[in-house]
Image (spheres, rainbow, N blue to C red):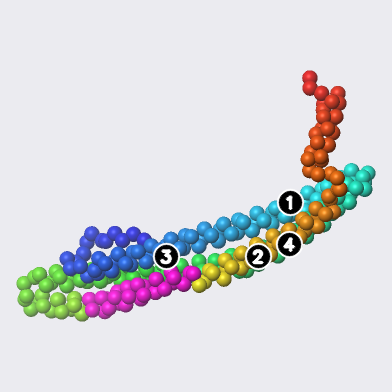
């Protein structure tokens, strides 16, 4: 929020101590930063869960595509391997969906609710700023009559100006005090508010990856062939690729 004072109607008297203004700007600045961080975190969490869902859906799509490959009809071992992969990918997708639903309820929705508080806070700050401008305008009016010669009409106008100033000053001071009291409390409350959400996020991730360890452990046991370590499979693949490259239809011109 910009704190540029109006050029016209400014009082000579410092009606709000500079320390108070600095305290107010500091506390409100912290809340503005918190609002931006909350909005960014909510957006990033949504992107993360969307990416997670896309990943597991793509994995399921790949296994289904492999199952429809004609090679599965010709090679029973390959069919068994792809079927095991398809089962694992569907299990992964199911647990992933469960994890995303949990994160939606325990993290994303609380972030959204927390962010919904800031418009009311910003409106309260705007009302405080308007009250301050009214206070300055009427204080300048009082000072103007105080500087004039004390004639009857001037004293009458001075009295009227002071009467107008009193409720406006009280209104500003009440708004200012309320915000200075409540802004720090609101800022510090974020810790108690978000801690359960972040604990739930960690638990959701731990639960998901624990299940993934089981799923892929089972898949590994089904696919592993005795006496065929990864190095040997790599050599066998390279040998087959060399044979394919030797065919005349793929030979370099």
Q: Nearer the viewer, mark 2 or mark 1?
A: 2
Q: Which residue is mark 1?
A: 58
Marks 2 and 1, Cα distance to the nearest angstrom? 21 Å
Tell me which label, 4 or 2, sits earlier in the chain: 2
Secondary element at image label 4: helix
Principal secondary structure, stretch drawn in magenta: helix
- Residue assigned mark 3: 31
Does residue 62 belong to the magenta stretch? no
Magenta highlight range: 165-191
Image quadrant in which you'd find residue 239 = top right
Quadrant assignment, res 96: bottom right
Question: Quadrant location of residue 149?
Answer: bottom left
**Residue named by callout 4:** 211
> How far is the residue under mark 3 from the one under mark 1?
40 Å
Q: Going 83% across and 50% down the picture, which residue do you hit?
A: 224
- Determine the secondary structure under disc 1: helix
Q: Residue furthest top?
A: 253
**C-alpha distance separating marks 4 and 3:** 39 Å
Marks 3 and 2, the one that precedes in the sequence: 3
Q: How many angstroms separate mark 3 from mark 2 (CA)?
A: 29 Å
Residue visible at 20% across and 80% down in the picture: 163
Q: Earlier in the sequence, mark 4 or mark 3?
A: 3
173 part of magenta stretch: yes
Report the disc number at residue 204: 2
Pick the quarter of the image with the C terminus: top right
Q: Does residue 64 appear in this view?
A: no
**Spatial separation of the CA atoms under disc 4 and disc 2:** 11 Å
Question: Which label lies toward us, 4 or 2?
Answer: 4
Mark 1–mark 4 Cα distance, whole angstroms, equals 19 Å
- Classify mark 4: residues with Cα within 10 Å, few (<14), some (14-19) or many (20+): some
């Amino acid at each position: 929020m910009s704190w540029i004072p109006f050029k016209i109607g400014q009082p000579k008297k410092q009606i709000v101590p500079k320390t108070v203004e600095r305290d107010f700007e500091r506390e409100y600045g912290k809340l503005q930063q918190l609002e931006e961080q909350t909005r960014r975190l909510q957006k990033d969490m949504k992107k993360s869960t969307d990416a997670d869902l896309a990943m597991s859906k793509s994995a399921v799509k790949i296994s289904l595509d492999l199952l429809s490959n004609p090679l599965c009809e010709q090679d029973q071992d390959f069919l068994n391997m792809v079927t095991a992969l398809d089962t694992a990918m569907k299990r992964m997708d199911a647990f992933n969906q469960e994890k995303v639903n949990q994160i939606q309820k325990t993290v994303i929705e609380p972030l959204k609710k927390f962010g919904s508080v800031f418009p009311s806070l910003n409106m309260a700050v705007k009302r405080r700023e308007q009250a301050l401008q009214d206070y300055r305008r009427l204080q300048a009016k009082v000072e103007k009559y105080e500087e004039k010669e004390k004639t009857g009409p001037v004293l009458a106008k001075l009295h009227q100006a002071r009467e107008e100033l009193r409720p406006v000053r009280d209104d500003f001071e009440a708004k200012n005090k309320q915000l200075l009291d409540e802004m720090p409390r609101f800022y510090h409350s974020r810790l108690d508010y978000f801690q359960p959400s972040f604990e739930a996020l960690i638990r959701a991730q731990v639960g998901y990856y624990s299940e993934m360890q089981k799923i892929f452990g089972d898949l590994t046991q089904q696919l592993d062939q005795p006496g065929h370590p990864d190095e040997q499979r790599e050599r066998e693949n390279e040998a087959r690729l060399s044979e394919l490259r030797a065919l005349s239809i793929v030979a370099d011109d």
